[in-house]
Image (cartoon, rainbow, N blue to C red):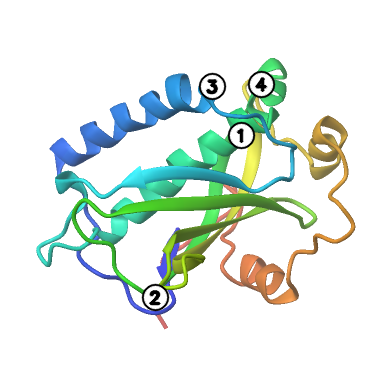
Amino acid sequence: MSECANGCPGASALPYSAAVHMFFRTLLHLFWFSRRKQGLGHYDVARTNFITLPTDLDVNWHMNNGVYFSIMDIARFDMLVRNGVWKIFRSRGWYPVVVAETLSFRKSLGLWQRFTIESRILGFDDKAVYVEQRFVRPGADGEPEVYAKGYIRGRFLKKEGGTVSVAELIDAIGEVPEEMVVPERLLEWGQGVSLPATRAAAPSVWS
């Protein structure tokens, strides 16, 4: 599930060729780039570099809004590999799924522009983990400038079935540093957009 707080630039659907390209892009980062970067602490900010490719563009020659979410996926994998969480969870047979995501746009990204996604685990509510991700480029002063910012609410599932509890997650990777707090507005958003459980009724009724 996704929403765009300030409007979504471009169409959201990815052509088949772009989707295939994104798949191989993911594999390249997961099995090559990520393993050759400096390791991180579990709650450190991960910075993943990208360049806007022709397959990323919409009809306005800006990055397609659907691509933003796909590239955020790659950056999260990069973060999980580098901070050691991926290895820990894989050893336990756990894998991540996105429950909800939201993205706000400030500036567009054009062809061949280089940018960085900054990703960090923010913390937890009673059921899920929150991750913040920022698309940044150098500003006029040379400092990182935010072009877009998104939040992910995710959970981890067990291969043998069932959901990984927050207590199990924290036991595996440690407590969140005291200075890191999930904003109340983000917790409210997570609850507000949540859908019924998989086995619960979820009729499509328009009021």
Callout 3 crowding tier (Cα within 10 Å): few <14, some 14–19, many ≥20: few
| CA neighbours of label 1 inside 10 A, class few (<14), some (14 to 19), many (20+) | many
Residue occupying the point 51% across, 60% down: 134
The quadrant holding residue 169 is top right
Mark before the other along the chain sequence, 2 or 1: 1
Give the amino acid type for the residue marked by disc 4 in the picture: Lys
- Picture coordinates of residue 173, whole percent (x, y): 80, 34
* CA distance for labels 2 and 1: 26 Å
Vertical comparison of 207 with 127: above or below:
below
- Residue 106's label in the rendered image is 2
User: Residue 80 has which mark?
Assistant: 1
Residue at 75 percent across and 74 percent down: it is: 184
Occupied quadrant, residue 26? top left
In the picture of the structure, the residue carrying the numbered disc 3 is 35
Number of on-image labels: 4
Tell whether label 2 touches label 4 (CB within 8 Å).
no
Closer to viewer: mark 4 or mark 2: 2
* Disc 3 versus disc 1: nearer the observer: 3
State the image coordinates of residue 196 (x, y, percent, origin top left): 59, 57
3 or 1: tag closer to the N-terminus:
3
Query: What is the three-letter code of the residue carrying label 3?
Result: Arg
